[in-house]
Amino acid sequence: GQLRSVMVSLRSVIELLRGMICLLRRVIGLFRSVIGLLRSVIVLLRGVIGQLRSVMVSLRSVIGLLRGVKGLLRSVIGSLRSVIGLFRSVIGLLRSVIVLLRGVIGQLRSVMASLRSVIGLLRGVIG
């Protein structure tokens, strides 16, 4: 009877460990996507800086090209809007990573509780 309960507890520990591994894989995937998003944000920021530099050169050199400068400013604003959108999605991803990590911590706690019950059962079998 006690051997069966030990086996059932071990099975639940194994299932919890499998779930933890799955969650950790998801967390790693989310971190990879966050890194990819941060790289694209950096590329966009470089583009914005380059566009701002070209705007400054245009304003200094040719005052008559104000219409072209307006077009460049519009593209800079569009790039900034996309950067802001990317930052919002990064924040959302980080929030979901935190939620997943909380789930992992909860599963770790339940694994520890299951291990404690297995140890208690083994002590009962041995003693």
Image (spheres, rainbow, N blue to C red):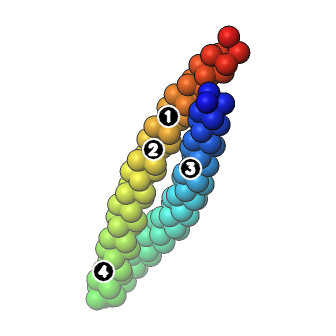
Residue 48: x and y in percent read 43, 70
Q: Amino acid at mark 4?
A: Arg
- Category of crowding for the residue at label 3, using alpha-carbon neighbours closer than 10 angstroms: few (below 14), some (14–19), many (at least 20): some
Label 3 to label 4: alpha-carbon separation: 48 Å
Q: Which comes sooner in the sequence, label 3 or label 2?
A: 3
Q: Residues within 10 Å of mark 4 (few under 14, many from 20)?
A: few
**Residues marked 3 and 4 touching at CB (< 8 Å):** no
Which corner quadrant holds the C terminus? Answer: top right
Element at label 2: helix
User: Type of residue at label 1?
Assistant: Ser
In-front residue for pair 43/63: 43
Q: Earlier in the sequence, mark 2 or mark 1?
A: 2
Between disc 4 and disc 1, the foreground one is 1
Residue matched to label 1: 110
Residue 19: image tag: 3
Which disc is residue 74 wearing?
Answer: 4
- Whichever of labels 3 and 4 marks the residue nearer the N terminus, that label is 3
- Residue 94, given in percent of the width and then of the height, sits at 43, 52
